[in-house]
Amino acid sequence: MLPLSIGDLPVTRMDPHDLPLRIAFVNLRARTKDWHHVIMVPMGIMALSATLKKAFRKRIEVRLFDTTTFPEQQDPDAAVHAWLADFRPHLLGIRGFTSQADEFPIVARIAKEIDPGCLVIAGGPHASTNSPSLYAVEDVDYVVPHEGEETLVEIVANLLERKPIGAISGLAKRGPRGPLFNPARSQIQDLDALPFPDYDLIDLDAYQERVTMTAFLPRARFTSLFTSRGCYYRCSYCHTNFGKKMRYRSPENVLEEMDRLIEERGVREFQVIDDIFNADKERAIAIFDGIVKRGWDIALAFPNGLRADRMDEEFVQAAKAAGTYYWALAVETASLRLQKQIYKFNKLDKVFDSIALSDRHDIFTCTFNMLGFPTETEMEMHATLDYNLRSAAHVTHFFVVTPYEGTTMNKELERWGIRAGELDDELLGFQNFSGSDEHGSLSPVPRSRIQELIVDGVQRFFFDARRLARMLQLSHNHVHLALHLETRRWSAGYDWDTIPDRDAARLLAQLFVSARAADPVRCGHLPVPPRSLLTERAA
Ligand code: B12
Ligand code: SF4
């Protein structure tokens, strides 16, 4: 489809003497509580802020309201209103996921109510899906899909010079018959030329108290690290926010950012959130070796961003030496047929070996899996559960497939006789963390049955004495582990007397007792085991 020009629209009503130009960002969170407990620094907005500050220095002022750090149980709307009314931005940038699609109109409306002249721009993961719903939001003036740095710099330059912004490349907007796109902007090739993320924009302390993307509390004062953009695989359920061509930061550039964060912000743990950090093994190992050479006593975690079938002993050894204590490896499905169908092409034997290798090197390893692909049979789901049960993984997640807008899988639904239009957001659970029990299924296996299989998988995977013993041995903090396992006990529907493996029950009981004693506030809700269980002798 040829891009249509969206033409020149009037610029925001800005008094030429009203400098600096005030730029506000709001990082959204979903209204459902599913993800409130997970928190990571907003790297995208910090990247944009750093680029803008480098380009315009004192001519702009940038502030952020991160609703993800707002108290979990409170609705942030009133606070966002008060914050915007106080700051009165000329430009508001809203960043969110598709799971937060309903939040864009709310925040955009607040901004327009306060100042109808405020220019409202949506960007980030949801904006990169070309979702028609975002283009239906009246109060959003423009959308910036994909990488935002260069487009935003040009917008701000034009605003400062009081030039129209409508023709800027990379912009999109609502048209009478759907989205209108200006010519796309080419991707930034030299990532080393970008400034480091702007940590003055956030209060790093505010991100330390809740669990991270690893599903555990961090081991030490932590932040995220994004060392490459893009991924050349084409898994059908995944997004292409940063394109299909890999772009890398050099090891020196990554190490320099780490150095600054260690020295200036007291960071001691880095969680790498690239799409595929190990796409270039040499570069990845150069980063690990650089850490060792500098003698940093830091922790590294990879809550995503590794292809397990590209790992080998040399990589795992180097990662371990640099301080890696945790990683998550994607299996997704143990069916070769489905691996092909979803274009993941995971080499399943190799993945299995990488999990074992990680265990041998004492790296706490999590696996990611999905159940409910179009055409997936119950037998294939069993195969995925069994694969994980046989593996040396320490924790696992079984998610239910959600075909997000903008993904190949969403476009291919009709191929499997599923009409995307008939699957409303509620049905697919876009608002939830990979859907919830009552939502639909893409596979011939009903959703309720998938849910039963997941419960069965959780029961057998986690409540196994040998696996629990290994988790206890590797976990850096037993309080964190106890909190995590309590969520698994709850999902498994187990009470103390229904856990079939009595050694597992005993290990869990001992863990809960010690966690409650160590941290009564955080662990007050952990169920108290019966005394008899604690005194029972091991089988
Ligand atoms: C870290 C992360 C998380 C963290 C969130 C942390 C955070 N503060 O963002 C957690 C663990 C909570 C998370 C959860 C989920 N995530 Co996530 N996550 C990521 C990950 C790995 C990195 C995000 C990041 O920081 N990227 C680096 C920065 C530099 O990129 P960026 O934020 O996109 O910003 C750039 C542009 O988007 C743009 N931009 C960003 N904001 C703005 C604003 C304006 C105004 C403008 C103009 C431009 C702009 O410019 C930036 C610089 O170029 C991405 C993968 C990826 N490669 O990005 C997935 C990703 C964003 N997640 C994804 C998904 C599916 C999810 C979940 C739905 C998973 C699930 N099934 O439940 C949940 C939903 C979360 C929720 N709250 O509702 C999808 C996005 C799908 C979508 N369309 O929304 C991604 C792309 C993964 C993938 N490849 O499919 N996630
Ligand atoms: S799922 Fe991972 S390997 Fe597949 S395309 Fe997405 S980032 Fe790349």
Image (cartoon, grey):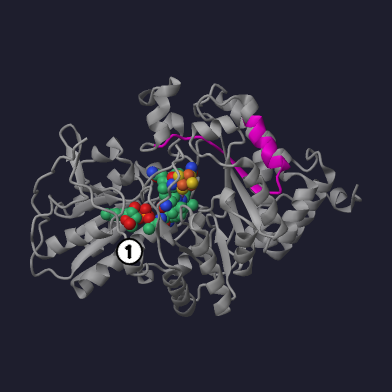
Farthest residue in the top direction?
417
Would residue 404 be visible to someone looking at this image?
Answer: yes
Residue toward you, 41 or 520: 41
Q: Residue 62's x, y, as percent?
A: 27, 66
Q: Quick one: 313 or 51, which is closer to the camera?
A: 313
Location of residue 111 with respect to 325 vertically, above or below: above
Under mark 1, the amino acid is Asp
Q: Position of residue 202 (x, y in %)?
A: 39, 67
Find residue 368 and report its image quarter: top right
Q: Is residue 387 magenta?
A: yes
What segment carries the magenta color? Answer: 381-404
Residue 53 percent coordinates (x, y): 26, 70
Q: How many numbered circles are shown?
A: 1
Residue 524 visible? The answer is: no
Does 466 appear in magenta?
no
Judged from the image, the secondary structure of the residue bearing numbered disc 1 is loop
Tell me the residue that label 1 is attached to.
190
Of residues 229 and 273, the one nearer the viewer is 229
Q: Quadrant of the N terminus?
A: top left
| Residue at image coords 67%, 56% | 358
Q: Image check: 409 left or right of 217?
A: left
Say if 399 sits above or below 114 in the image: above
